[in-house]
Image (cartoon, rainbow, N blue to C red):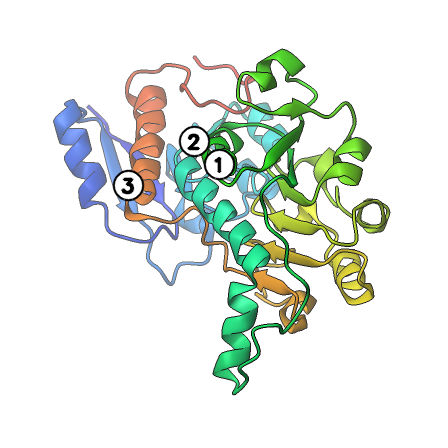
Amino acid sequence: MAKKKVLYYHIDGHLDFENALLRKWGVADIDLVEAEKTTNNMIEAARDADGLVVEYQPISREIIGRLPRLKIISLQAIGVDNIDLQAATEHGICVTNCPGFCSEEVALHTVGLIIDLARKITLLDRTVRSGGWDPLYGYRTHRLSGRTIGLYFFGSIPKMMMPLLKALNLKVLVYAPTKSARFLAGYGAEKAESFDELLRRSDILSLHCPLIESTVHLISDRELKMMKKSAFLINSARGRVVDEAALVRALKAGEIQAAAVDVIEDETTEQSALFGLENTVITPHAAFISEDSYYAARRIALEQLVQRLSKNLRPANLVNHQVKVN
């Protein structure tokens, strides 16, 4: 019986974990191969692959068109904005992701960023390390109790955040068009009837949407001008959801008070104009990381491969639902 080849392309770590799972599951018709770390030509590396595992590596229409054996692209991530979904569907390639694998980590990280801004922890740490000792340095602080946090969308991460936000005695306002007021009330949240309402009323605005065409630069000059001057902006979604140049202008002009981001627009160069601003906290796309989430993503990604290649089933986490599975 010919084995199906699955290439793990630029994925950190060896494949002992995955191979042990295959043995445990009794799957013998899949061969997992790790690409050399120095391999930058994906087309050459994956030319005979039936499956491909990536995280943030861009998979373009050109790449897809030159991999005739490929049946599945399994992402060890949630977002699929790095994959040309239309091209994959046209070529009959399943694209899968790992929804919810890091919800607890991102929820905790996001709440941590909120507390950091509210108490100026990172800002004051920087001043002390540079020789200062001024507990009043920076912007004025207020209690979180009774203030309003606005959540843009309400998936697994905001749901995980709710007990923490309630423990901080924050009022929760949600803009999620597909969620009813009754549904949100069940979580202790109020429904905003429009995005503009969310912007105007929020003392803290936290973004939890995928990066799709309609959310590119969701937050730009217009939106920032609508927010309270005392407001905080939190972005643990994707960098391009926020127009970074507009955010820099708003922070410099005092249109909002401060921002905390785990993502930036250009993570290929790892540079941003936000780096030079004092009223900004930045972490390096680290919200999703823990030992637990790391292995959860690896297991979920492998499950999708087995469902498609070994069992010839539609994978449970199929993203491009229009694709036909023989």
* Measured Cα–Cα span from mark 3 to mark 2: 13 Å
Under mark 1, the amino acid is Ile
Q: Is residue 7 above or below residue 268?
A: above
In the image, 196: left or right of 135?
Answer: right
Q: Are marks 3 and 2 in contact (CB under 8 Å)?
A: no
Under mark 3, the amino acid is Tyr
Q: Is residue 132 above or below residue 93?
A: below
- Point out residue 133 in the picture as x, y percentages from the top left corner: 53, 82
Which residue is under mark 1?
A: 78
Mark 3 Cα within 10 Å, few/some/many (few <14, many 20+)? some
Q: Are marks 1 and 2 in contact (CB under 8 Å)?
A: yes
Quarter of the image containing the N terminus? Answer: top left
Under mark 2, the amino acid is Gly
- Point out residue 314 in the picture as x, y percentages from the top left corner: 42, 15
Which residue is under mark 3?
A: 295
104 or 319, which lies in front?
104
